[in-house]
């Protein structure tokens, strides 16, 4: 994806299905990444809470 100023956006460049698929890929990546984080030590509860918030 590239960036464009809002008034220059062309809605025909990317379909809703493509956006949904990319969002699903991004969410899957973040879920895998957050699942791999360590949650032991003195801040374990905070790490788990933040990870839960980021998952929605």
Image (cartoon, grey):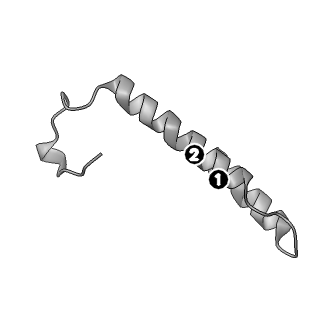
* Residue 24 % position (x, y): 51, 34
Tally of marks:
2
Q: Residue furthest right?
A: 41
Question: Image check: 3 left or right of 41?
Answer: left
**Identity of the residue drawn at 68% across and 54% down:** 34
Residue 18's disc number: none
The secondary element bearing badge 2 is classed as helix
Query: Is residue 28 positioned above or below 50 on the image?
Result: above
Gap in angstroms between the C-alphas marked 1 and 2: 6 Å
Q: Is the C terminus in the top left, top right, bottom left or bottom right quadrant?
A: top right
- Check disc 1: other Cα within 10 Å, few if <14, some if 14-19, many if 20+: few
The answer to whether residue 52 is left or right of residue 29 is: right
Q: Label for residue 29?
A: 2
Is 20 positioned to the left or the right of 34 in the image? Answer: left
Dots 1, 2 in contact, CB < 8 A: yes
Taking the view exactly as shown, the residue that stands out farthest to the left is 8
Q: Residue at x 34, y 25 (%)?
A: 16
**Relative to residue 38, is residue 2 depicted above or below?**
above
Q: What numbered label is drawn on residue 33? A: 1
Q: Residues within 10 Å of mark 2 (few under 14, many from 20)?
A: few
Above/below status of 5 relative to 13: below
The residue shown at (84%, 67%) is 44
Quadrant of res 41: bottom right
Q: For the N terminus, which image quadrant?
A: top left
> Residue, x 26% and y 31% (percent of image)?
14
Q: Is residue 2 left or right of residue 24?
A: left
What SS does tag 1 mark? helix
């Amino acid at each position: 994806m590239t960036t464009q100023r809002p008034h220059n956006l062309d809605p025909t460049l990317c379909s809703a299905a493509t956006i949904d698929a990319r969002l699903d890929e991004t969410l899957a990546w973040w879920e895998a990444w957050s699942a791999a984080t360590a949650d032991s030590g003195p801040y374990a509860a905070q790490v788990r809470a933040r990870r839960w918030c980021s998952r929605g």
